[in-house]
Image: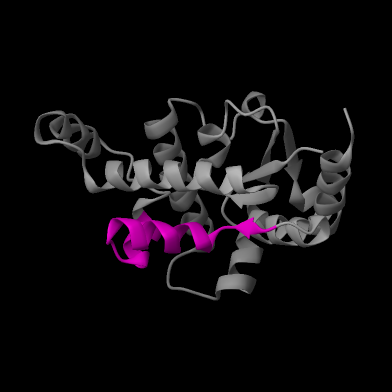
Amino acid sequence: MKKIITISREFGGGGRTIGKRLAEELGVPCYDSEIIEKVAIESGFAEEYIKDKGEYTYPSLLMGLLMSRSLYTGPSNEDKIWLIQCKIIKELAEKGPCVIVGRCADYILRERDDVMKVFIHADIKARAKRIVEVYGETDEDPIKRLRDKDKRRAAYYTQYTDIVWGASRNYDVCLDSSVIGIDRCVSVLKEIALETE
């Protein structure tokens, strides 16, 4: 059995739900908001701040300039959060089998042989419908919300991993939740995870 399953996902694709249900099916812990809580305790930053800075960044020329400036002024808050997040994710993986949602866990645990790296994606219209159902209506167009979140998530991932977020070659399994559904995603991942070598 693959001991650790990391779930990377497009916003609104149901990756968090799939991760939690998969962990329940396998009888293992699922780490998601728990990582934010642990980083908050260790870093002293507020959980809301970590939610924003621990998985998202703003892709822009200004951000590039600020990052290059940190070479002279020392690590930024985002860099400090990244280092603590890496430490915590490695510690959680050492504890035993688990599912870890987001937080670049696939990259952080890349040197382990017992990790199954999963990417969940979905059609943008299905994702837009889902975020309205799950998170409610806002003044912002749901498609724009999706694109902004995905862009920020991709920029963060690339900034800290130098790898293209969502590129299929970087994952063991890629599933389209809008085609096969949440339930089938869970059952497929469970079957793969339990396969013996």
Quadrant location of the N terminus in the rendered image: top right
Residue drawn at point x = 31 percent, y = 66 percent: 46
The boundaries of the magenta stretch are 29-52
The correct choice, above or below, for 45 with respect to 169 in the image is below
Residue 13 visible in the displayed image: no
Residue 47 is inside the magenta segment: yes
Queried whether the magenta region covers residue 38, the answer comes back as yes
Q: Position of residue 55 (x, y in %)?
A: 43, 49
How are the colours assigned in the image?
A: one colour
State the residue lying farthest toward the left: 72
- Which residue appears at 47% of the width and 56% of the height? 144
Q: Residue at x 85, y 39 (%)?
A: 192
Q: Looking at the image, is 150 positioned above or below residue 116?
A: below
x, y (%) of residue 36? Answer: 44, 59
Quadrant for residue 176, please give it.
top right
37 and 143: which one is in front?
A: 37
Confirm whether residue 117 shows in the render. yes
Asked if residue 186 lies left or right of residue 133, the reply is right
